[in-house]
Amino acid sequence: MNTHFSSRLRRLPLAVLAATCTLATLPALATQGTFPHGYGVKSEGMGGVGIALAQDGLAGATNPAGMVRVGSRFDVGAAFLSVDNGSRFAGTTYDATENKGLYIIPQLGANYMIDADSSIGVSVVGNGVGTAYSRSANVGGMQGPRSQLQQMVATFSYARKLGEVHSVGAGLVLARQALTIRGPSSIGLPEGHDSSYGAGIRVGWSGQLTPELTIGATYASKVDMGKMDRFKGLLAEGGDMDVPANYGLGAAYRLGATTLAADVMRIEWGEVRSLANPGVTNAGGPPGSANGPGFGWRNQSVWRVGVDHALSEALTLRAGYNQGTRLLNPRDTYLGVLAPSANRRHVTVGASYQVSRDGELSLAYARSIKGTTQGTGTPPDGLTDLYMGQDWLSVSYGMRF
């Protein structure tokens, strides 16, 4: 490897992230940046829609205004995730799923109706992104790269109906993240573990304009996370890694036993410097500085559509589709070896079955279609292609009380 290339490798911020629902310590990979395609198993089965269609105690993670419409209930579940991801560097393919077992992503939601018009609740979900190459893999000078970011995000919400049509909600968002990096010592970078905490807000509105039509809007501020000192020389802004702001609009239309729903979301990855800064070739400063190397992630728009149909009082079937704009800038793909979020299309199906008067079992399957981003920049970025595909199987149990 030439001296110029090696010097660039030593400057890489290997702060990468590994997708997991951080209620547990088991790693998992998200499907759009560090976010999964939806929150709650019912939403997952409908392509992730949920801004105007609240269905369970996880609704507060998408639009807290919907919590007052789901009643008093408790939901607990998990997703089982199989991942196919990796990279091709200078024509050689490297598999990044050394651990072939299933990843597990728990989820939890609870809502309590204070009275007929107001509720309090909590929705706990996980975000992340990451990778795990074998220890023998040498990807462009990185020996056995692997990393993991775990983010637990809990939204404590209050929602209130304003008459028969409108409802509003507000939530305090509390988050914890833990970052582990192993294997970069081969290019002179530190290994280790660090964590930080942060807070933000989420607000929302929902309006049932007619008996059939409901629309909604939601906004979440950036979750301002504390800096991770262990990685102050790797992550931009001295070890900073925030959860990005996001906002969206949704609509749901009920026609008899069938409901159609659609959302559009905007996620501001481009406002988090450690994720959005240009990569090795185009970095404007040394690692850890405000303009230091990043992953080249761009702001992303996500479209979701879904349908459910009640076959009977006990059984409901669901299906959906979810697609985001391309997240990775092709000129900045080298650091994406550690966070290869190249997939952006999802096809989903799901179902719920009423097992008792107050209990229901829900299932969802999502195929995140394998996507590839080909590097187009100056080497090493131009030598790096990234790919990812996923299969999700989710199950939850919901209980009304």
Image (cartoon, rainbow, N blue to C red):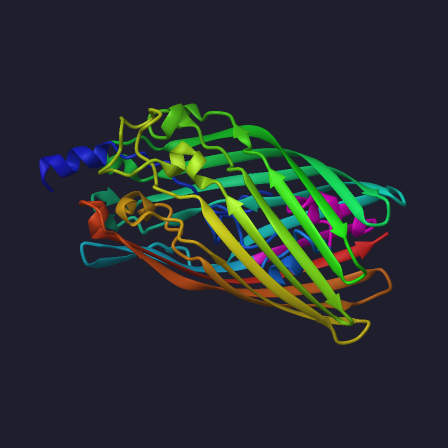
- The outermost residue toward the bottom is 311
Residue 332, image x, y percentages? 28, 44
State how many labels appear.
0
Residue 232 found in image quarter: top left
Given residues 231 and 112, the one toward you in this image is 112
Residue at x 25% of width, y 43% of height:
142
Please tell me which residue is depicted at 62% across the width and 55% down the height of the picture: 78
Residue 218: image x %, image y %? 64, 43
Residue 300 visible, this angle: yes
The residues colored magenta run 56-79
In the image, taking residue 233 as reference, residue 40 lies left or right, namely right
Q: Percent x, y for residue 30?
A: 49, 51
Say left or right for 132 vs 109: left
Q: In which quarter of the image is residue 197?
A: top right
Q: Which residue lies furthest to the left in this view?
A: 2
Within the magenta stretch, is there residue 59? yes
Residue 228 relative to residue 37: left or right = left
Is residue 263 shown above or below 16?
below
Q: Is residue 258 above or below residue 77?
A: below
Q: Is residue 164 left or right of residue 44?
A: right
Residue 134, image x, y percentages: 31, 51
Is residue 241 part of the magenta span, yes or no? Answer: no
Q: Nearer the viewer, residue 341 or 168?
A: 168
Depicted 96 relative to depicted 272: above or below: below
Q: Residue lying farthest front?
A: 209
Kindly tell me whether residue 139 is visible in this rendering: no
- Which residue is at a point 17% across and 33% down the rendered structure image? 7
Q: Nearer the viewer, residue 211 or 102?
A: 211
Q: In which quarter of the image is the N terminus?
A: top left
